[in-house]
Amino acid sequence: SSITNITIVGTGVIGNGWITRFLTNGYKVTAYDPAPGAEEKTREAVRSAWDYAGKLGLKEGSSEENLTFEEDLGKALAHADFVQENVPEREELKRSVIASIDEHAPKHAVISSSTSGILPTVLQADCAHHPERVIVGHPFNPVYLMPLVELVGGNKTEDSFVDKAREFYEGLGMKPLIVHQEIEGHIADRLMEAVWRESLHIVNDGVATTEEVDASIVYGPGLRWALMGPFMTLHMGGGKAGMRHLLHQFGPALKLPWTKLEAPELTDELAEKVITGCEAQTEGVDMQKMEERRDDFLVELQQLLEKYWP
Ligand code: NAD
């Protein structure tokens, strides 16, 4: 591909995950983050993620040494072929950072934002030069292991840049999903939000604890969701005649729950209940160990997925 140099703007949780993914795939990465100590934190994060990312396959020439930090944004962008923006999720900040990236990056460079919720049309609005190369490339944490990346173009985006990004992300072993219509939160986060909202409602009403809600997913739908989404799950729930049977048989009953789902208010009291619930679940547990367990599991799960869903 025509992409050699990558620039990362913002090196927090997500920026560092991208850096690891790019480096283990053999790319040269230049990073920019004005926070004091950012470089040290990034190098530490990359080091601790490296072995996990490597289990998905290290490309030839990959090295932690292919990472350079720059203190000047213009310098960081001077040779960029691809820019991944990961600054905090605040609209005004993102708009102005993306406008500066547009000012400094060569005009062929793709500018991809990791935003979880903001529309690309909004993000590219202040770009005075080449807004047509601004897209959303929304990843999932930990970026060095999760394959999904949602790609969304705005009103001014040219399709060729979405295509270029898709090809590039595929080359990193990812599964790009093109979202054809802009919508806040894109696709996967909206689905997760629906489950999160109902989880809060259940805890708020004292129906179940945070631990019980988690168990209901882990030992139930979560196991199936690792292999198939809501549509195939229900299609199979309809037996041999699939979704056709399911919707005819249960149509009216399926609609009923939608009238019962609630959107609770996130009061201080509910927040406290959720926080103490989660803290009780992890009492005496080392969070670093939990991360390692998550990463080991994600690697093996993806190997299983490839075996059963090639
Ligand atoms: P974070 O707070 O961990 O990191 C943000 C980083 O941006 C910090 O290191 C900060 O110093 C830096 N920063 C602030 N202003 C900057 C500027 N002007 N220029 C360059 N860097 C600047 O946040 P995060 O969780 O990594 O989220 C970053 C983006 O990724 C957000 O848009 C978020 O919606 C998205 N995202 C987050 C997750 C997640 O699970 N955390 C998942 C997918 C997408």
Image (cartoon, rainbow, N blue to C red):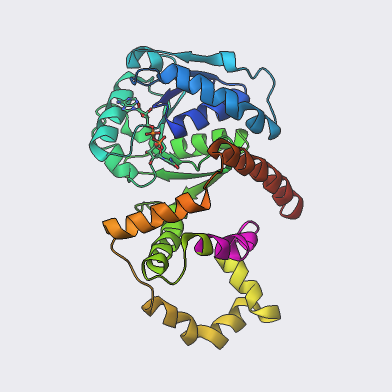
Residue 151, placed above or below residue 42: below
Instruction: State the quadrant of the N terminus.
Output: top right
Which x, y percent locates residue 61? 67, 17
Count of marks placed on residues: 0
The foreground one among 131 and 210 is: 210
Q: Reply yes or no: does residue 79 show up in magenta.
A: no
> In this orientation, does residue 173 appear?
yes
Q: Residue 300 sits in which quadrant?
A: top right
Residue in view at x 33 percent, y 67 percent:
263
What range of the chain is rendered magenta? 213-228
- The vertical placement of 288 against 222, above or below, is above
Please say if 186 is above or below 53: below
The answer to whether residue 187 shows anywhere in this view is no
Left/right placement of residue 221 relative to residue 201 reads right
90, 293: nearer the viewer:
293
Which quarter of the rendered image does ligand 1 occupy?
top left
Can you give x and y, in whole percent of width and height, for residue 120 in the image? 34, 42
Measured from the top left, where is residue 5 in percent x and y?
A: 50, 19
Residue at 40% across, 17% down: 37
Considering only vertical position in the picture, is 228 above or below 49? below
- Magenta segment, principal secondary structure? helix
Lateral position of residue 275 relative to residue 163, left or right: left
246 or 105, nearer to the observer: 246
- Could you tell me which residue is drawn at 36 percent across and 12 percent down? 71
Is residue 220 part of the magenta span, yes or no? Answer: yes
In this rendering, position of residue 118 left or right of residue 230: left
